[in-house]
Image (spheres, rainbow, N blue to C red):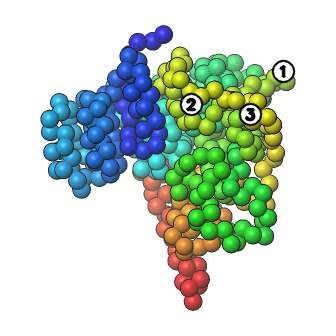
């Protein structure tokens, strides 16, 4: 078993950060916190700094910097603020960087860590959806290792025994040729059995009630539309260097099986586990070992039945749009992600209906948007252009809706 690992947690006050730090709390003999980064929650960041005694902490929002500085004044740690300074923390040499900042805001710090050749446990799917080509290319150049934290991708990672050498340009490294395809599972969200004719009346309150997990409002809506699974398919393409045709999805309401790997000899290896995110996080943190953190065992007898079904394209058009964006390649995934974020926000604030989410994303994908994916600045420019186009569509529909 490896020695003590130094870790940096990006998004320390969010759900991924909190789950990661709970494992550090349980195993101080295995992990030491080097750096903590948060977005706005300076009070929580200060509390964590006092508990874990990191060498450096950073906050993106500089508004409350004077207050934060006072709160940590008795600690022997460096304090920085602003996006650029926080990205520099991600590049500081440690054993593991946990990338838990949500949205495209997490991309600069992910890139900084990858450029520095770090081992990065990534939960920020937007970085790979919008800039997968850039991140993957840089990982090859720097020798960085990218470990997935999302439960489905982590399941595939476990099934392929850590996917030795999956970042390598040598496609035979790790016996990649033995694999046929992979499969991610999806719960189907809260509207799996709701008649499609009733979708127009779906409210934000109903959409955020996930049947299995407590999640943020945006990701809960993405689960309801299955856009979240579509984004995960795009993410899987870059994580595992697979063709779109090699990534399948099955509806699995029980959520006991998280991912499967199909081999060319007819064998299938599946990873199973409970719904606790600490399971995939612990695997990434301890990799290539495992961490005994005392989880509740999965009770298959209590579940009794495991069911699987294909994704219905009529019920989940957002999922199909994500697959189309992946097939199209280029800037399409970045446009998809940006348009979806704007549309979901508009739905949650009552400006558009549930069915408008897919319609707006489709409109943005159909628009002849231009750009390249060679640099992060270019990706961000594409993102902003797509968001502006989506906002214009939302504004026109909102005005019409209130006339």
Please state the horizontal and vertical placement of residue 77, each as a whole percent of the image. Answer: 20, 32
- Depth check, mark 3 against mark 1: the one in front is 3
Q: Image quadrant of residue 26?
A: top left
- Dot placed on the residue nearer the N-terminal end, 1 or 2: 1
Q: Which residue is at a point 55% across and 48% down the rendered structure image?
A: 214
Give the spatial CA distance, label 2 vs label 3. Answer: 22 Å
How busy is the neighbourhood of tag 1: few (under 14 within 10 Å), some, or many (20 plus)?
few
| Residue placed under numbered mark 3 in the picture | 302
- Nearest to the observer: residue 212 or residue 61: 212
- Nearest to the observer: residue 226 or residue 43: 43
Please state the horizontal and vertical placement of residue 312, each as a whole percent of the image. Answer: 80, 54
Secondary structure of the residue carrying tag 2 is: helix
- Nearest to the observer: residue 138 or residue 19: 19
Secondary structure of the residue carrying tag 3 is: helix
Q: Are marks 1 and 2 in contact (CB under 8 Å)?
A: no
Secondary structure of the residue carrying tag 1 is: loop
Q: Residue furthest front?
A: 302
- Dot placed on the residue nearer the N-terminal end, 2 or 3: 2
| Residue placed under numbered mark 1 in the picture | 265
Direction from residue 76 to residue 401 in the image, left or right: right
Q: Which residue is at a point 78% across and 65% down the rendered structure image?
A: 196
Label at residue 280: 2
Q: Which residue is at a point 74% across and 34% down the rendered structure image?
A: 302
Q: Which residue is at a point 20% across and 35% down the rendered structure image?
A: 78
Q: Image quadrant of residue 177?
A: top right
């Amino acid at each position: 078993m490896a020695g003590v690992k130094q870790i940096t947690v990006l998004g320390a006050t969010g759900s991924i950060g909190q789950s990661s730090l709970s494992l550090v709390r349980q195993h101080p003999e295995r992990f030491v916190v080097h750096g903590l980064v948060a977005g706005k929650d300076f009070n929580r960041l200060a509390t964590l700094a006092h508990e874990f005694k990191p060498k450096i902490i950073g906050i993106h929002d500089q508004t409350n910097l004077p207050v934060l500085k006072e709160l940590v004044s008795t600690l022997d740690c460096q304090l920085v603020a602003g996006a650029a300074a926080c990205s520099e923390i991600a590049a500081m040499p440690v054993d593991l960087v946990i990338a838990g900042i949500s949205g495209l805001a997490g991309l600069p710090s992910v890139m900084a860590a990858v450029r520095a050749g770090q081992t990065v446990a990534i939960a920020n799917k937007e970085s790979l959806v919008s800039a997968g080509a850039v991140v993957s290319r840089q990982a090859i150049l720097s020798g960085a290792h990218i470990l997935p934290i999302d439960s489905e991708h982590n399941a595939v990672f476990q099934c392929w025994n850590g996917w030795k050498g999956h970042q390598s340009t040598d496609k035979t490294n790790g016996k990649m040729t033995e694999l046929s395809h992979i499969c991610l599972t999806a719960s189907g969200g809260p509207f799996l059995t709701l008649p499609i004719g009733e979708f127009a009346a779906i409210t934000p309150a109903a959409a955020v009630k996930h049947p299995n997990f407590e999640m943020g409002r945006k990701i809960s809506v993405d689960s309801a539309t299955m856009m979240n699974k579509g984004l995960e398919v795009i993410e899987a393409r870059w994580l595992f260097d697979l063709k779109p045709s090699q990534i399948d999805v099955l509806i699995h309401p029980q959520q006991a099986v998280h991912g499967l790997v199909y081999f060319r000899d007819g064998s299938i290896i599946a990873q199973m586990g409970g719904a606790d995110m600490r399971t995939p996080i612990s695997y990434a943190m301890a990799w290539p070992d495992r961490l005994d953190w005392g989880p509740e065992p999965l009770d298959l007898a209590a579940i009794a039945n495991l069911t699987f079904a294909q994704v219905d394209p009529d019920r989940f058009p957002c999922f199909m749009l994500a697959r189309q964006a992946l097939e199209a390649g280029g800037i399409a995934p970045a446009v998809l992600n940006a348009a979806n974020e704007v549309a979901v926000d508009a739905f949650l604030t009552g400006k558009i209906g549930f069915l408008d989410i897919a319609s707006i994303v489709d409109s943005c994908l159909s628009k002849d948007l231009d750009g390249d994916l060679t640099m992060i600045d270019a990706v961000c420019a594409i993102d902003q252009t797509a968001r502006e186009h989506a906002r214009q569509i939302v504004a026109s529909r909102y005005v019409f809706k209130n006339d």
